[in-house]
């Protein structure tokens, strides 16, 4: 009993197949899904290799909690602090969403750094994955910049003055510093436009950048494959075999050296020719 | 890596892939498990360690402690080390040179370390550099987390002789949060700002001190100190007088 006749396909199944075929014919979605989901990865991938996905999941969590917060937050110097109080004290589960966004930011930084540490220790940034590393480094900077811009939005004393210092530091950099400082502050001084500018950067500019670079990062990972642990069973077996071969060769050289004397630097062929004479 | 080594790696990886497993579901299942764990931790922290509400921003009041998020502590600590005490510790080292060296090093690292070796114990230089950077950043973060935030309540600065300027100046110094960046006679934070115990010895003049308080960057380019232009003129005059005599008249 190898096949089971389940009768003619129902109209729903037929329509479904037709829709998938229609979309696939125009988009190549089947090929894409096969390329992304059903590619092979080396055996013995480690639990440490889940950190990248976890960072992405936390970014998703930040996006969702951020969207909810944006429904109540008001990026205006007169109302910003009040709206944070409102979210924390009055909105149903607002304290939870705000807490998750705040802790999620810290968690994302931790996971992103652990992920980078894993890649570094494994040498996974080496050929052919150099550009995967570079896109990852850009993602790390953008994540930290998210932390900087988001910190100001709560509009409390600690965050405000820390951001004043941070922007002063940026503005003190040579050549471009003063211009970048003015761009961040929306002018020479901190003011109402600074808050809405940070809001815009935090809500629109960097999330767009992060999403783009996650896309690039994933493209590279899918194209090049996830790296194999340097101490996978397969690698260790190969290394053992190579070591055995090296030893065997060394032994052979030694036993040969006992019989025939080949003067250093002289080719072996004339020596044999002499024997023939 | 030489062309032949690149080819060898590609072949080796193709072999690893050939007897591997499909990404879906094997990797996805592990990924989802850890991601859910991380999200669970975030939710737990959000419930257990509630995020508090601070004081609303008041640009006129400078009674504040400029503290960044914990993941910027290592940069904040750099400011404490490099604050222009001498030629060897210019502010620009902490604000620009070291952070940018770290950034550059990180971006171009794969183009520096190009050897084919991937095993930890066969890459001593990479591991040494990595350990050094991690230890440095970890230590700086620890320093930042444990550094005193400023002047504790009830603490005050004992200056001799006590007159109107030294008493009022100390009050203003404490009330305006100067102590979260500066130290006078062991009271206050050891940075990012310079120690002011002997500020008067620099003979900068009262007017210089007032102008500097109003606009620090106009006197010390590259300074990251916030402007105190919103202080009342008489407070500025007291602080100017006070700072200009610290370590000389007031000890």
Image (cartoon, coloured by chain):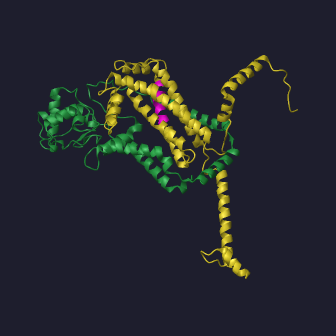
Chain colours: A yellow, B green
> Is residue B227 positioned above or below A7 on the image?
below
A137 with respect to B245 (left or right): right
- The answer to if A102 sits in the magenta stretch is yes
Which residue range is magenta in the image? A97-109
In percent of the image, x 48 and y 28: which residue is there?
A207
Residue B145 image position (x, y, % from top left): 38, 40
In percent of the image, x 16 and y 44: which residue is there?
B202
User: Quick one: quadrant of the C terminus of chain B?
Assistant: top left
Q: Residue furthest bottom?
A: A277
- The answer to if A190 sits in the magenta stretch is no
Residue B75 image position (x, y, % from top left): 37, 41
Residue B106 image position (x, y, % from top left): 46, 44
> Is residue A4 positioned above or below A10 on the image?
below
In front: A150, or A88? A150
In front: B208, or A272? A272
B95 with respect to A96 (left or right): left
Residue A211 image position (x, y, % from top left): 52, 30
Is residue A81 visible in the rendered image? The answer is: yes
């Amino acid at each position: 009993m190898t096949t089971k006749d389940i009768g003619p396909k129902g109209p729903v199944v037929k329509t479904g197949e037709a829709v998938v075929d229609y979309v696939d014919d125009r988009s190549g979605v089947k090929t894409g899904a096969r390329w992304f989901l059903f590619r092979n990865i080396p055996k013995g991938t480690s639990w440490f290799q889940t950190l990248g996905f976890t960072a992405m999941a936390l970014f998703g969590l930040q996006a969702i909690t951020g969207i909810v917060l944006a429904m109540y937050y008001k990026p205006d110097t007169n109302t910003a602090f009040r709206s944070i109080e409102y979210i924390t004290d009055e909105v149903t589960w607002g304290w939870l969403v705000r807490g998750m966004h705040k802790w999620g930011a810290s968690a994302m930084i931790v996971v992103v750094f652990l992920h980078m540490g894993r890649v570094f220790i494994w040498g996974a940034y080496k050929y052919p994955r150099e550009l995967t590393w570079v896109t990852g480094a850009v993602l790390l900077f953008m994540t930290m910049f998210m932390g900087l811009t988001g910190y100001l939005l709560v509009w409390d004393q600690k965050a405000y003055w820390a951001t004043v210092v941070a922007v002063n530091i940026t503005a003190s950099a040579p050549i471009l510093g003063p211009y970048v400082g003015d761009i961040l502050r929306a002018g020479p001084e901190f003011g109402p436009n600074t808050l809405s500018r940070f809001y815009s950067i935090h809500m629109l500019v960097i999330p767009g950048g992060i999403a783009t670079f996650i896309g690039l990062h994933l493209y590279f990972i899918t194209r090049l494959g996830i790296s194999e642990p340097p101490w996978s069973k397969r690698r260790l077996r190969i290394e053992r075999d190579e070591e055995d071969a090296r030893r065997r060769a060394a032994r052979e050289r030694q036993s040969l050296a006992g019989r025939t004397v080949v003067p250093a630097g002289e080719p072996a062929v004339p020596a044999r020719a002499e024997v023939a004479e | 890596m030489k062309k032949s080594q690149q080819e060898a790696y590609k072949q080796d990886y193709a072999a690893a892939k050939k007897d591997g497993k499909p990404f879906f579901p094997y990797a996805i299942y592990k990924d989802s498990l850890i991601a859910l764990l991380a999200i669970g931790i975030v939710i737990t922290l959000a419930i257990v360690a509630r995020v508090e509400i601070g004081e609303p921003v008041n640009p006129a009041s400078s009674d504040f402690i400029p503290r960044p998020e914990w993941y910027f502590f290592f940069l904040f600590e750099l400011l404490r080390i490099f604050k222009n005490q001498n030629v060897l510790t210019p502010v620009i080292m902490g604000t620009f040179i070291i952070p940018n060296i770290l950034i550059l090093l990180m971006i171009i690292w794969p183009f520096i370390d190009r050897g084919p070796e991937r095993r930890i114990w066969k890459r001593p230089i990479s591991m040494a550099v990595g350990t050094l950077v991690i230890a440095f950043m970890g230590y700086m973060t620890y320093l930042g987390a444990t550094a005193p935030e400023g002047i504790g309540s009830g603490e005050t600065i004992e200056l001799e002789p006590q007159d109107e300027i030294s008493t009022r100046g100390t009050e203003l110094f404490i009330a305006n949060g100067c102590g979260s960046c500066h130290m006078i006679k062991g009271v206050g934070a050891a940075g990012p700002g310079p120690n002011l115990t002997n500020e008067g010895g620099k003979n900068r003049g009262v007017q210089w001190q007032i102008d500097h308080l109003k606009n620090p960057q106009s006197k010390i380019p590259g300074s990251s100190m916030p402007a105190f232009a919103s202080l009342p003129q008489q407070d500025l005059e007291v602080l100017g007088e006070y700072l200009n005599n610290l370590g000389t008249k007031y000890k």
